[in-house]
Image (cartoon, rainbow, N blue to C red):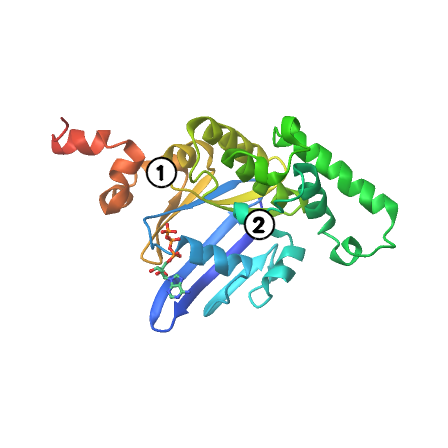
């Protein structure tokens, strides 16, 4: 049975009088893909920010493998094994794919990364990690190209690879398929699904086909709160979820149309 790797207990985030995340309790299990979905403004990204330490919480607690991290800044949570995949803008545009990955792998030992007297085996290890990732990301054909020369889909895969390079326990992905074409979406979906062999994935994604296909569990948020949690089938069939706002997103509108007799 999977054990808990990341927990949020009664987490609330307020901006002044506005409550963006309201009393959220989550238990994310090791080796799973856990998706967070909900309409625009539901609080998904704010929840991510609180879990990764980008933004401080107002109330509640966050635990990584049972250890309280609520008041640790983001960079210290990285050392506890939480990694966030950032947007394309976080790539080094004037470095090759291989060099981007090698630097990200070296970043696991920041003191060593900038030390001119660093031990050569650490550099070799970082090169090995980069080589393995080039293959895993299916970027062999462009490994020596500058990251700025990659297609959008390749850049987004590289972003995920940059998070993987740190060999974290949990990888946070915020809309990794946004702006992608169909082929790139299929590649990204395969990559995310494969991640749970080595990592735990927390995913924000608007593409319901992906969410339903690759998630082990789903948290549905609405107006800062949890509306429902469960396996994809449970969420798909949850009346509250469908009635609230997801009917057409999850079912492609078919069921809702059938029920209302409004199909054209
Ligand atoms: N720094 C901030 N100050 C004030 N309000 C904020 C701040 N960040 C987010 N909010 C508000 O919190 C609410 C939740 O925003 P959030 O970005 O978390 O939603 P979301 O579910 O990620 O939406 P989307 O799917 O559009 O990205 C929104 O009403 C937003 O305006």
**Mark 1 to mark 2 CA distance (whole Å):** 36 Å
Rendered position, 153 above or below 38:
above
**Which residue is denoted by mark 1 in the rendering?**
234
Which quadrant contains ligand 1?
Answer: bottom left
On-image quarter of the N terminus: top right
Circle 2 residue? 90
Asked if the residue at label 1 sits under 8 Å from ligand 1, the reply is: no
* Secondary structure of residue under mark 1: helix
Q: Is residue 261 left or right of residue 249?
A: left
Residue extending furthest toward the bottom? 16
**Side of 245 relative to 216 (left or right):** left
Across and down, in percent, residue 175 comes to 45, 44
Residue 96 place in picture, x, y as percent: 67, 39
> Can see residue 133?
yes
Q: Is 22 in front, or is 66? A: 22
Quarter location, residue 94: top right
């Amino acid at each position: 049975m999977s054990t808990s790797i990341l927990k949020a207990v009664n987490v609330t985030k307020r901006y002044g009088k506005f409550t963006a995340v309201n009393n959220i309790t989550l238990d994310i299990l090791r080796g799973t893909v856990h998706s967070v979905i909900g309409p625009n403004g539901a609080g998904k990204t704010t929840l991510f920010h609180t879990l990764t330490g980008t933004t401080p919480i107002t109330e509640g607690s966050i635990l990584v493998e049972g250890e309280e991290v609520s008041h640790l800044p983001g960079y210290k949570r990285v050392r506890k094994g939480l990694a966030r995949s950032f947007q394309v803008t976080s790539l080094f545009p004037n470095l090759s794919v291989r060099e981007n990955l090698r630097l990200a792998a070296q970043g696991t030992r920041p003191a060593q990364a900038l030390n001119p007297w660093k031990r050569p085996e650490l550099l070799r290890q970082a090169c090995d990690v980069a080589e393995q990732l080039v293959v895993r990301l299916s970027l062999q054909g462009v490994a020596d190209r500058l990251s700025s020369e990659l297609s959008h889909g390749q850049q987004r895969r590289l972003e995920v690879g940059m998070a993987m390079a740190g060999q974290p326990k949990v990888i946070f992905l915020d809309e990794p398929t946004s702006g992608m074409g169909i082929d790139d979406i299929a590649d990204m979906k395969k990559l995310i699904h494969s991640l749970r062999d080595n990592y735990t994935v927390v995913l924000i994604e608007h593409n319901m086909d992906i969410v339903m296909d690759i998630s082990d569990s789903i948290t549905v948020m609405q107006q800062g709160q949890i509306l429902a949690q469960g396996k994809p089938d449970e969420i798909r069939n949850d009346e509250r979820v469908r009635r609230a706002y997801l009917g057409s997103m999850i079912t492609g509108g078919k069921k809702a149309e059938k029920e209302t007799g409004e199909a054209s």
